[in-house]
Image: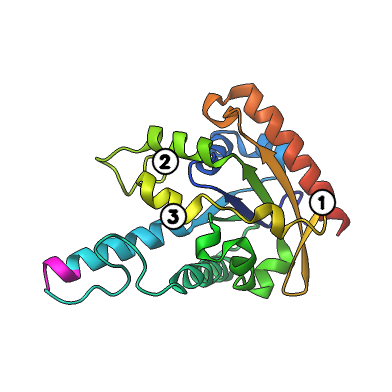
């Protein structure tokens, strides 16, 4: 078995620091990333680009072809609530296709946020494939709702709304979708593993209320090393 995670699920509120963590990991030499963080060659599968493609398609259908929108209304709200779960199935499908075609071992990262309004993490994990769950470990980046809102406002660049690092939500939409987070309730039964579809998935929490992900540098690397070290020990013993 390679000395790194094969499948990592990365969860958090919006703007909590997920993308900043991945950016920091990508900047490191590969062997250092493996030795310190147990993260191999990276393939990140994020549901935001999928969601944004739906927004763009709907806008073109309405504006260019004068046809009804397929996924969202004019305010960017899904027409069907289970589209949130469809995105989870898309993450798993993209993972399967990548693993089918990739000859060398990688760390595949599935990245998504879910609030209670969308069914929360409890509902999302019901839609992950058994193959993903059996291989996965999970890192949850914890920030408060107020901190999520602060960073969401700060990072938003209206000239690049499709950008992984610069997209944002309106305060109204952020509050509706992400004010309430069920992570603590979802994982309350066990401090080391979460249960989903009969699988036990090891997890750990990366505390980021002090926004170490924006500061970066050694402080971020040290905290990541501690978190991934705990997670690797849990994954190796499961």
Q: Is tag 3's residue or tag 2's residue first in the polypeptide sequence? A: 2
Residue designated by label 3: 176
Give residue 179's position: percent from left, percent from top: 51, 49
Image quadrant in which you'd find residue 176: bottom left
Specify the principal SS of the magenta part. helix
Image quadrant in which you'd find residue 62: bottom left
Q: Residue furthest right?
A: 237
- Labelled pair 1, 3 in contact (Cβ < 8 Å): no
Q: Secondary structure at mark 3?
A: helix
Q: In the rendering, which numbered label is found on residue 152?
A: none
Image quadrant in which you'd find residue 59: bottom left
Q: Nearer the viewer, residue 23 or 150?
A: 150
Residue designated by label 2: 165
Circle 3 Cα neighbour tier, 10 Å, few/some/many (<14 / 14–19 / ≥20): some
Q: Is residue 9 left or right of residue 58?
A: right
Report the Cα–Cα distance between label 2 and label 1. 31 Å
Circle 1 Cα neighbour tier, 10 Å, few/some/many (<14 / 14–19 / ≥20): few
Residue designated by label 1: 191
Report the Cα–Cα distance between label 1 and label 3. 28 Å
Q: Is residue 30 left or right of residue 236?
A: left
Give residue 26's position: percent from left, percent from top: 54, 39
Eye-nearest disc, 3 or 2: 3
Q: Residue at x 88, y 55 (%)?
A: 237
The stretch in magenta equals 61-65
Q: Residue at x 77, y 70 (%)?
A: 199
118 drawn magenta? no
Q: Residue at x 25, y 66 (%)?
A: 57
Q: Residue at x 51, y 37 (%)?
A: 146
Give residue 132's position: percent from left, percent from top: 66, 67
Eye-nearest disc, 2 or 1: 1
- Labelled pair 3, 2 in contact (Cβ < 8 Å): no
């Amino acid at each position: 078995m390679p000395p790194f995670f094969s499948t990592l699920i990365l969860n958090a509120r919006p703007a909590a620091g997920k993308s900043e963590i991945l950016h920091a990991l990508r900047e490191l030499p590969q062997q250092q990333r493996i030795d310190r963080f147990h993260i191999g060659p990276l393939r990140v599968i994020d549901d935001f680009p999928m969601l944004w493609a739906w927004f763009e398609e709907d806008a073109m259908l309405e504006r260019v072809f004068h046809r009804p929108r397929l996924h969202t209304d004019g305010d960017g709200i899904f027409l069907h609530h289970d589209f949130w779960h469809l995105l989870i199935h898309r993450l798993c499908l993209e993972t399967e296709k990548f693993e089918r075609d990739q000859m060398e071992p990688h760390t595949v990262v599935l990245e998504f946020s879910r609030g209670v309004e969308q069914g929360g993490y409890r509902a999302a994990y019901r839609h992950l494939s058994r193959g993903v769950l059996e291989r996965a470990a999970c890192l949850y980046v914890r920030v408060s709702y107020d901190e999520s809102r602060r960073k969401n406002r700060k990072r938003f660049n209206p000239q690049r709304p499709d950008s992984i690092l610069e997209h944002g939500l309106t305060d109204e939409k952020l509050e509706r979708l992400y004010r309430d987070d069920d992570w603590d309730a979802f994982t309350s039964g066990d401090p080391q593993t979460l249960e989903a579809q009969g699988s036990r998935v090891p997890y750990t929490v990366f505390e980021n209320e002090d926004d170490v992900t924006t500061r970066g540098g050694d402080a971020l690397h040290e905290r990541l090393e501690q978190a991934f070290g705990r997670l690797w020990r849990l994954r190796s013993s499961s």
